[in-house]
Amino acid sequence: MCLIGKLTCSHTSLQVRVAAGSARPASLLGALSSSGSKSFSSGRFAQQCFYSDFNVPPSAEFVARPVGICSLFKLPIRTSAEGLDAAFVGIPLDTGTSNRPGARFGPRHIRAESVMVRRFNPSTRTDPYHSLVVADIGDVDVNLYDLKDSCGRIRKAFQTIVANGCFPLTMGGDHTITYPILQAVAEKHGPVGLVHVDAHTDTGDQALGEKIYHGTPFRRCVDEGLLDCKRVAQIGIRGSSYSQDPYQYCWDQGFRIVLAEDCWMKSLVPLMAEVREQMGDGPVYISFDIDGIDPAYAPGTGTPEIAGLTPAQALEIIRGCRGLNIIGCDLVEVAPMYDLTGEWMGQSILQFLPT
Ligand SMILES: [Mn+2]
């Protein structure tokens, strides 16, 4: 049970949720104390955070966008997921890429671009920061010279995150990372449903004799029973293939495949109603490969394919996940050096926050 109150400060109006019986300490300046930010502009930061247990991004109405140590949405930086409902975490790894590398720089560039994202979305009217305690917990300490070692490190890091009862919100990194993430997530929640946006199914078996790279994560997940295969939807799939029946493996598992060409010129609202029905009440993980979106909009990626989803369709997919039992998500394959405007890198992940 929650009590919703509204307090008005001199410059801004803040909604405050007090969770009855919450073990969380009622720190009036939680965002300040957690980031140790009293040393700069404490008066203006205090107006953003006062009377709230929650971490709220400072508004650019009061704190200039470039001010502060770079974190996602300028949220406080924490060293662990303890006490958090959800945590942004980066995985700067791209040694699983098959074509253009660069996704190792995804997390830090997404953070840099995220200063443009304001706290409220007037279309959804969601206020995620007052539903969940969220912070940026930094990056997984990956080994760029050993992909298997990196997978072990990622799995271990995410075991700790989910053990804290925290939802991981991950910035990749290439799509290899979703495999060890789902190992940790499925250990906690059991086999999960999957909403997977991508140009590719990422269900290959091997390449160059290697079983682990960014073309195989969901095949490995099936091998290990990490997915509830009847609750898997892959959306935006397109491009050339190695065989005439490239989707047979997915269909054999029970996946739903939504080809990009079946999305062209359409609203995806009806599709997402069907996806919500498919997912039911069970735990759902969202894995969003930026290459699901057409490279005309989002060129900053390693394996671009023409004729993809539009940004409006991407928003319809994310908004269409509302109400699902979302237990984590990732945005992967952002390779910033191919997106010279930088416009896309931080824009989509805010709406991943489950509310
Ligand atoms: Mn992918």
Image (cartoon, rainbow, N blue to C red):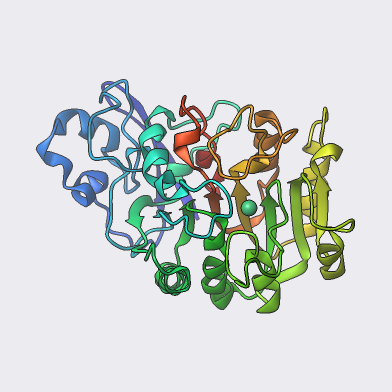
Q: Nearer the viewer, residue 262 or 211?
A: 211
Classify residue 254 as left or right of residue 279.
Answer: right
Residue 328 higher or lower than 273, as above or below:
below
* Residue farthest along the right direction in this orientation: 244
Is 200 on the left or on the right of 47, as rendered?
A: right
Residue at the extreme front of the image, as rendered: 208
Q: In front: 299, or 160?
A: 299
Can you see residue 346? no
Residue displayed at 64% across by 60% down: 215
Asked if residue 286 can be seen in this view, the reply is yes
- The quarter of the picture where residue 106 lies is top left
**Which residue shows up at 25% across the image and 48% down it?**
30
Residue furthest left as drawn? 39
Across and down, in percent, residue 83 comes to 34, 62
Residue visible at 58% across and 69% down in the picture: 212
Residue 117: where, in percent of width, then height?
44, 30
Percent x, y for residue 317? Answer: 69, 41
Measured as percent of width and height from the top left, residue 107 is found at 41, 47
- The answer to whether residue 268 is left or right of residue 323 is right
Rendered residue at 58%/54% (across/down) = 98
